[in-house]
Structures are given as structure tokens and as C-alpha cells.
């Protein structure tokens, strides 16, 4: 067993609802002790700036470009992450000196793997100065330089977590249902296969925001009042993404919400919840073997309609579906924990990605270290 590092992970995902802060104590390999977690919400006005930033980012051709408001937005989002770290330390009676490293994801504003272009705004050196803690940031770029898709990165952490599972039916598949969903299948012998599996919450969020003025369908309440519009569901599930010979990572713009005349509010939410669940099972069909246990993290696990559909679809393959909590984990914290874990692996020059997770040519480490 190597040195144990105390690391904080920071995640701001495609849902753009806020910052997740989590701590782990780890050697970057098999030892993982999960610590406290904190979620810090963005105020609506800042969330709107982030959404506008996504539009401005479409003009980026070189990943260092910051057109429009993006330079100011990068500074401001870094400041909010520094404030989130300060709050986390205070709430948990910790000092900056108690933490070895921060894993800083930043906010993805552009992800075009076919062009080897990924942009996460967030100033690692500024965050290190403001927190007084070393920061590992920009963890996707090196994977792309070596032929990978730059995503998903969380599978390496999922593999470490399997050591904490008991009475498991293998293969195990961790599914993160965020804005975009991704899956990680791990077999008993440690073999990992991972890729993005389709739209998660992003279509539902955009749909209910456009038609009900609320940011997401809490608990699936709106979807529970609707029915599945078969033709609309088929249109999404017939997308070539699901039948292509190779897996690729997704940008939130790869799947767009329905137009307003294609469904009424609850039917649209119900259909998109089904699409989210069916996309996971359909994409799992590309794995070497259908998983026997699905462990669901991310915000989608709180949508009871998505979870009910997942359980029904998985049961047709003799598989069971557990929420992260039912498996003994914290589904809100898991992705932020992963960035803490990956930061330690980066410090130790251990691989973050593998050919079977991102399509990279060989296992590679990554990340840029910003020291004090």
C-alpha cells in the first residue's frame, strides 16, 4: 500500500446546477475511504450565464480561446469553486493544510471528440492560489492527445469501488445519469469497459424548463402524469449513436429536445424519461456481456420514473438495478469523489484512462498540476 492522500474533488456537471464537493482518502489505487460531501447550488442568474457560455463556446477552434463572456465566466466560476472549498473546509472543521490536493474538473463548455477538442473552463492556478491547496486540473486533454475520446474518466474510480461491494452478481455496471449518461462495466476479473450511453437528464431538463419554467422534473413528478409517445421515443432510440460499431463520447448538443408541438408537457417528460432508461440498456448491449447488476448514480437515480423503467428493462435480461445508496455509496457524491481520486492518480502518474474506457491508444495519465 502506498502513501494515503487526502483529496478534495470538485465537479460541475452538464446539468449546470452547482458544484459538488467531496473528499476521499486514497492511495489512488485500491484504498478508498470516502469522506464528507457538500453540494453548492448556482444562483439562477449565474446558471443563465453558463448556458449563454455554451453558445459562445461554439465559436472556439483552439482550446485556449475564450470568446465573448467566457474569460470573465472562467474567472467567476473559479471564484465560486474556491468559495465552495472554503465552505466545505469550514463545515467539516478542516484546514487547507489538511488537504494534499484538489481535483478540479471545471465546467465543460465544448466537447468535440471527433475534432480532438474539449474545453473545460476553470483556472487551476487561480484556484490553487485562492485555496492554498495544490490543484490538478485539465484532466481530459492528454487522453485526446493520445487518440482517446476524453470521456468518460470516472470508470477508473468505479473499478476501485467494486472492492467495497458484497454479494455481487457479475458483471457490475456503474451508470452515472447526469446530463449525459455513461456506464462502466466491470467483470469479476477486473476487466473494465466504459463509454457514454446516451442522453441522461439533459433532454428532460431542457423540456420542462422550456415548457414549465422549472429547471428539472423533481422526482419524476411531471413524467409520472404522462404517457410514452412511441414515435417520439423511437426517433431518439433509432439514432445512429446506438448502432454504430464504435462508441463515442457525447456533447449535450448531440441530442436536442423535442419541439413544443410533438407532445404536451407530461407526455414529453414521460417519453424522455423512458428514453433515458432505454438508452442505458440499449448501449449496454455493446458490452462483452450484459451486466447482472446495475448501480445507478447521478441525479437521474432520483427520478422514480427513470428508475422504474430501468428496472423493468433490465429485468428482461435477468439483471437487477440498485441505486448507489442501495449498493452502499452516495450517488450525489460519486462523481466529485472520482475527481479527488483521479487527482491522486495524476500526482502518482498512474493511468486515468484506458483503451477500453475512452479508446485511447494505450493507458495514459493526465492532468496539469498547479502548485502554490
Image: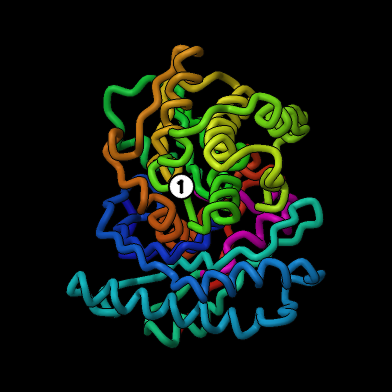
**Residue 58: % across, % down:** 77, 66
Camera-nearest residue between 233 and 298: 233
> Furthest residue to the left?
93
Residue at 59 percent of width and 70 percent of height: 50
| Residue shown at the point (35%, 75%) measured from the top left | 85
Quadrant of the image occupied by residue 357: top right
Density class for disc 1 (Cα within 10 Å; few <14, some 14-19, many ≥20) is many
The image position of residue 172, as x and y in percent, is: 43, 28
Residue drawn at x 73%, y 59% as measured from the top left: 145
Place of residue 207 in the rendered image (x, y in percent of width and height, measured from the top left) = 59, 49
Residue 102 lies in quadrant: bottom left
Q: Is residue 151 magenta?
A: yes
The reply to whether residue 193 is visible in this rendering is: no
Which residue is pictured at 74% across the width and 53% down the height?
113
Query: Would you name the residue on which mark 1 appears?
Result: 217
Q: Give the residues in magenta.
A: 137-154
Above/below status of 290 relative to 137: above
What kind of secondary structure does the magenta stretch mostly adopt? loop
Magenta-span inclusion, residue 321: no
In this rendering, would 39 be left or right of 272?
Answer: left
* 275 or 20: nearer the viewer: 275
The quadrant in which the C terminus is found is bottom left
Q: Is residue 355 visible?
A: yes
Amino acid at each position: 500500500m502506498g502513501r494515503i492522500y487526502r483529496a478534495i474533488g470538485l465537479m460541475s456537471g452538464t446539468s449546470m446546477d452547482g458544484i459538488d464537493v467531496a473528499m476521499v482518502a486514497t492511495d489512488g489505487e485500491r484504498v478508498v475511504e470516502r469522506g464528507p460531501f457538500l453540494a453548492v447550488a448556482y444562483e439562477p442568474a449565474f446558471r443563465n450565464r453558463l448556458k449563454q457560455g455554451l453558445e459562445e463556446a461554439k465559436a472556439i477552434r483552439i482550446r485556449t480561446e475564450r470568446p465573448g463572456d467566457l474569460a470573465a465566466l472562467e474567472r467567476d466560476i473559479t471564484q465560486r469553486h474556491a468559495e465552495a472549498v472554503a465552505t466545505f473546509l469550514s463545515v467539516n472543521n478542516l484546514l487547507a493544510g489538511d488537504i494534499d490536493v484538489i481535483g478540479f474538473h471545471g465546467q465543460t463548455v465544448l466537447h468535440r471528440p471527433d475534432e480532438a477538442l474539449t474545453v473545460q473552463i476553470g483556472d487551476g492556478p487561480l484556484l490553487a492560489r485562492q485555496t492554498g491547496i495544490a490543484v490538478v486540473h485539465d484532466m481530459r486533454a492528454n487522453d485526446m492527445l493520445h487518440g482517446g475520446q476524453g470521456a468518460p474518466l470516472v470508470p477508473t474510480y468505479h473499478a476501485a469501488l467494486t472492492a467495497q461491494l458484497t454479494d455481487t452478481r457479475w458483471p457490475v455496471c456503474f451508470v452515472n445519469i447526469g446530463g449525459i449518461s455513461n456506464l462502466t462495466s466491470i467483470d469479476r476479473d477486473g476487466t473494465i469497459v466504459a463509454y457514454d450511453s446516451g442522453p441522461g437528464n439533459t433532454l428532460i431538463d431542457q423540456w420542462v424548463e422550456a415548457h414549465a419554467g422549472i429547471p428539472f422534473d423533481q422526482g419524476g413528478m411531471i413524467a409520472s402524469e404522462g404517457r410514452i409517445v412511441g414515435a417520439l421515443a423511437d426517433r431518439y432510440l433509432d439514432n445512429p449513436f446506438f448502432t454504430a460499431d464504435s462508441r463515442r463520447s457525447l456533447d449535450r448538443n448531440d441530442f436536442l429536445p423535442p419541439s413544443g408541438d410533438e407532445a404536451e408537457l407530461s407526455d414529453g417528460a414521460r417519453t424522455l424519461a423512458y428514453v433515458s432508461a432505454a438508452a442505458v440498456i440499449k448501449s449496454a448491449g455493446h458490452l462483452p456481456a450484459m451486466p447482472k447488476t446495475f448501480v445507478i448514480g447521478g441525479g437521474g437515480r432520483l427520478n422514480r420514473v427513470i428508475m422504474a423503467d430501468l428496472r423493468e428493462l433490465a429485468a428482461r435480461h435477468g439483471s437487477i438495478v440498485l441505486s448507489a445508496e442501495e449498493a452502499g455509496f452516495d450517488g450525489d457524491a460519486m462523481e466529485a469523489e472520482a475527481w479527488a481520486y483521479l487527482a491522486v492518480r495524476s500526482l502518482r502518474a498512474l493511468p486515468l484512462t484506458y483503451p477500453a474506457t475512452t479508446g485511447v491508444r494505450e493507458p495514459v495519465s493526465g492532468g496539469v498540476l498547479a502548485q502554490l
